[in-house]
Image (cartoon, grey):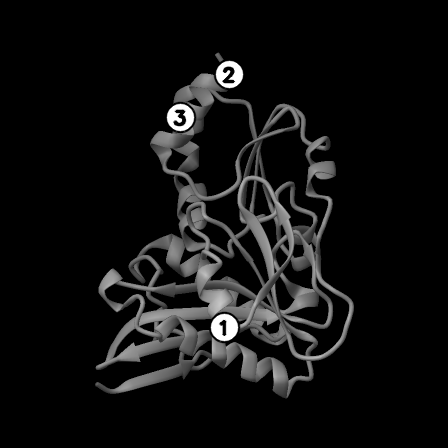
Amino acid sequence: MKIEVISLNQENISQYPPKCFLNPKNEGYQIKREWIKKRFSEGLKMKLLYLEKKCIGFIEYIPGEYVWRAVDAMGYMFIHCIWISPNKHKEKGYGSLLVKECIEDAKKEGKYGVAIVTSEGPFMAGKDLFIKNGFESVASAKPSFELMLKTLKKGPLPKFRDWEKQLSKYKGLNIIYSNQCPWVARFINELDEIVKKKKLKLKVTELKNAKQAQNAPSIYGVFNLVYNGKLLADHYISNTRFLNIINKELK
């Protein structure tokens, strides 16, 4: 079977939509695409894996100084996301193939290594794939976050930022998010109707650059639902899940 890895750029991004993206006609997809375009100048790379002319996966990574996670990773290449789908294509080495693409780019750019935050929770990669490829855990945090590292040369270790300290800044009901995830972008776009129906006093804050994302009130940073300094959700949630949380916490 023919395998092809395609590197996205400004010219071909509309032609090759990554697998986890929503339908290209969906506004969440379009928002994410524009987010990517802005990141190319910061060194972001997104590579798609095609099998027999069908996209079955992708990997997104960026130099550590521009990472959109609550970590310090200067001098490293940092993986935001990796995705293989459908399930029949998993456990066949395709994920490792994409990880190796990132490692090779990190070597070419003289990085200390490659880092990623893993989790056993939704919307994040588990650590097993990275252990297979020579990564080791250098930090952990509840409930199941691991800061994994593939060392290429000696340098200061990456570390988690003090995301819990950021929580005290948020009084009342807050959503703090970034458009790094298209599903979050879609959710935010649908939020007005829910807020009006429930008459919620909700403050919505978009993280617009890497520095802001690194100071998010959670490690993943992409989506944060916070109520009076308490983190209620730290990843994309459905409308139903959002309403269930609100009904429980604000009753």
14 in relation to 121, above or below: below
Q: Specify whether residue 15 is in view.
A: no
Mark 2 — residue? 250
Q: CA distance from mark 2 to mark 1?
A: 45 Å
Which quadrant would residue 243 be assigned to in this image? top left
Q: Identify which residue is drawn at 52% across, 62% down.
A: 35
Q: CA distance from mark 3 to mark 2?
A: 10 Å
Which quadrant would residue 66 be assigned to in this image? bottom right
Tell me the crowding category of disc 1: few under 14, some 14 to 19, or many 20 or more residues within 10 angstroms, Cα based. some
In primary-sequence order, the first of circles 2 and 1 is 1
182 in relation to 141, above or below: below
Q: Identify which residue is drawn at 45% across, 56% down.
A: 126
Mark 1: which secondary structure? loop
Mark 3 — residue? 243
Instruction: Residue 239: give x, y in percent of width and height.
Output: 36, 34
184 in relation to 51, above or below: above
Mark 1 — residue? 133
In this view, the residue in front, 168 or 203, is 168
In primary-sequence order, the first of circles 1 and 3 is 1
117 in relation to 164, above or below: below
Tell me the crowding category of disc 2: few under 14, some 14 to 19, or many 20 or more residues within 10 angstroms, Cα based. few
Instruction: Residue 75: give x, y in percent of width and height.
Output: 72, 72
Residue furthest to the top? 251
Residue furthest to the right? 156
Mark 2: which secondary structure? loop
Q: Specify whether residue 189 is in view.
A: yes
